[in-house]
C-alpha cells in the first residue's frame, strides 16, 4: 500500500528536515507539509503544503480524509521556553492538538502516529544521571506536563483502540538548517550560529549546566527507525534516546577550539530553572534493544559538521 504521510508542525526545527527526508523516501507528492505559518521555500518548492491548525478537529479530519493519509508525524507543539510564557496556549496546542490527531487516526483507521515527547517529561524528582525509561515523571513546566499526558494518551489509544502510536523522548536537538523554536536547549544551536557569524554570544544558562543532546541527522534517523520498527518487538510505546551529554561550557569550548576568536558569556535567565529540572544524562538501552537505536554523532563530530555546514551557508548567502 502506498504511504500517504501528513507532517504537522512541518515548518519547525525538526519538521522541515523530516519532511524533506520523507519526500526523498516516499515521493514528494506523498508527503504533505502543514503548519499555521507561511511555508518555507524548501518545502513549498518540493511538494504539497497546507495550512493546518491542529486545535481545530474539523481541519485535521478533512485533511486526513481528503488525502487518504496512512501515517502522521505529529510535530506541532509549543516548546518549553515559550510554553512558560503562555502556558494556556501550550496546553491547548499540545494536548488538544494531539487528541485531535489520535481521534482522527482512530476514526479513519490511520495506520500509524509518530509523536515526539521530550526529556521535559522528567522533573526535579527524576534521577539526574542515566535516567531510565520507567521512572518518576513529575515535571514542573506546562510543556513537560503536556508531554507526560501525551505519552499516556498515546498508550491509551493503543491499548483501547489499537492505534499504532509511538513516541520518542527527545533531548536537546541541534541543527544547522532551521532556527530553534523557543526551547530551553536553543543555546546549543545559537552558540554555533553566533560563532560562525563572528559575533559573541550571551548564553542563557550557566557554564556548568549539563544536558543530553542529539544532532539532527540522528534525530531524523531515530524517527524513521522507530516508525519502521517491528511492532511485535516493542515492549514500550515511548522511548528514551540520546546522543551525548555536555555542559554549556563544554559546547562553547568545542566551538572555540574550532573558532578561536569566539567569545561566550553565561547570563542565565528563567530557562535556567527549567534546565535544572531535567536529567544530565539519559539511559536509552530500551530503544537500542527493542529497535536497534544507535547514534552516530558525539560532541566533536557534531561541532565539526555544524561549523562546516554553517560556513557553507554563510558563504552561499554572501
Image (tube, rainbow, N blue to C red):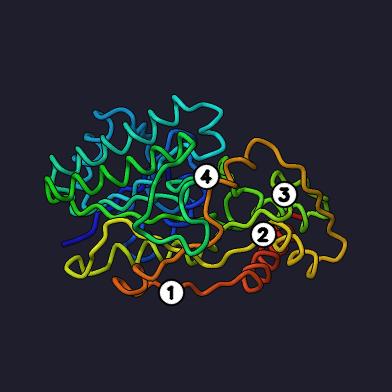
Q: CA distance from mark 3 to mark 2?
A: 9 Å
Q: Say whether disc 3 or disc 2 marks the residue closer to the N-terminus.
A: 3
- Given this view, does label 1 or label 4 mark the residue nearer the observer? 1
120 and 72: which is toward the camera: 120
Q: Is residue 73 rendered to the left or right of residue 170? A: left
Q: Which residue is mark 3?
A: 206
Q: For the residue labelled by badge 1, is the local secondary structure a helix, a strand or a loop?
A: loop
Quarter placement of the C terminus: bottom right
Q: Residues within 10 Å of mark 4 (few under 14, many from 20)?
A: few
Q: CA distance from mark 1 to mark 2?
A: 22 Å
- Indicate the position of residue 205 as horizontal and vertical percent values: 69, 46
Q: Residues within 10 Å of mark 3 (few under 14, many from 20)?
A: some
The residue drawn where x is 36% and y is 48% is 7
Q: Say whether disc 4 or disc 3 marks the residue closer to the N-terminus.
A: 4
Q: Which residue is mark 2?
A: 247
User: Can you say whether 178 is above or below 132 in the image?
Assistant: above
Kindly indicate whether the residue at mark 3 contacts the one at mark 4 (C-beta within 8 angstroms): no
Kindly indicate whether the residue at mark 3 contacts the one at mark 1 (C-beta within 8 angstroms): no
Q: Which residue is mark 4?
A: 40
Q: Residues within 10 Å of mark 2 (few under 14, many from 20)?
A: some
Q: For the residue labelled by badge 4, is the local secondary structure a helix, a strand or a loop?
A: loop
Residue 235: quadrant of the picture: bottom left
58 and 120: which is toward the camera: 120
Kindly indicate whether the residue at mark 4 contacts the one at mark 1 (C-beta within 8 angstroms): no
Kindly indicate whether the residue at mark 2 contacts the one at mark 1 (C-beta within 8 angstroms): no
- Indicate the position of residue 98 as horizontal and vertical percent values: 31, 39
- Marker disc for residue 294: 1
Q: CA distance from mark 2 to mark 4?
A: 32 Å
- Given this view, does label 4 or label 3 mark the residue nearer the observer? 3
- Indicate the position of residue 237 as horizontal and vertical percent values: 27, 57
Amino acid at each position: 500500500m502506498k504511504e500517504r504521510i501528513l507532517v504537522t508542525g512541518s515548518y519547525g526545527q525538526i519538521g522541515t528536515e523530516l519532511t524533506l527526508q520523507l519526500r526523498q523516501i516516499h515521493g514528494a507528492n506523498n508527503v504533505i507539509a502543514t503548519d499555521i505559518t507561511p511555508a518555507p521555500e524548501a518545502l513549498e518548492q518540493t511538494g504539497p503544503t497546507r495550512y493546518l491548525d491542529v486545535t481545530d478537529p474539523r481541519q485535521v479530519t478533512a485533511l486526513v480524509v481528503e488525502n487518504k493519509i496512512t501515517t502522521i508525524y505529529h510535530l506541532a507543539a509549543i516548546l518549553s521556553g515559550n510554553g512558560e510564557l503562555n502556558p494556556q496556549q501550550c496546553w491547548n496546542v499540545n494536548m488538544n492538538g494531539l487528541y485531535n490527531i489520535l481521534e482522527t487516526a482512530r476514526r479513519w483507521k490511520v495506520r500509524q502516529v509518530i509523536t515526539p515527547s521530550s526529556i521535559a517529561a522528567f522533573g526535579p524528582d527524576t534521577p539526574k544521571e542515566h535516567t531510565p525509561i520507567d521512572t518518576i515523571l513529575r515535571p514542573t513546566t506546562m510543556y513537560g506536563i503536556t508531554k507526560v499526558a501525551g505519552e499516556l494518551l498515546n498508550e491509551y489509544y493503543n491499548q483501547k483502540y489499537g492505534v499504532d502510536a509511538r513516541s520518542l523522548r527527545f533531548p536537546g536537538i541541534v541543527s544547522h538548517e532551521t532556527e530553534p523554536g523557543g526551547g530551553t536547549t536553543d543555546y546549543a544551536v545559537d552558540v554555533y550560529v553566533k560563532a560562525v557569524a563572528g559575533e559573541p554570544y550571551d548564553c542563557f544558562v550557566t557554564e556548568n549546566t549539563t544536558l543530553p543532546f542529539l544532532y539532527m541527522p540522528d534525530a531524523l534517523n531515530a524517527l524513521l527507525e522507530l516508525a519502521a520498527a517491528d511492532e511485535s518487538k516493542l515492549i514500550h510505546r515511548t522511548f528514551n534516546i540520546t546522543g551525548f551529554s555536555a555542559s554549556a561550557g563544554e559546547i562553547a569550548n568545542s566551538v572555540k577550539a574550532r573558532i578561536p576568536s569566539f567569545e561566550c558569556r553565561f547570563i542565565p535567565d528563567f530557562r535556567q530553572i527549567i534546565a535544572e529540572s531535567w536529567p544530565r544524562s539519559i539511559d536509552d538501552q530500551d530503544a537500542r534493544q527493542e529497535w536497534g537505536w544507535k547514534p552516530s554523532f558525539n560532541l566533536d563530530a557534531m561541532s565539526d559538521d555544524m561549523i562546516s555546514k554553517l560556513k557553507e551557508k554563510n558563504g552561499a548567502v554572501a
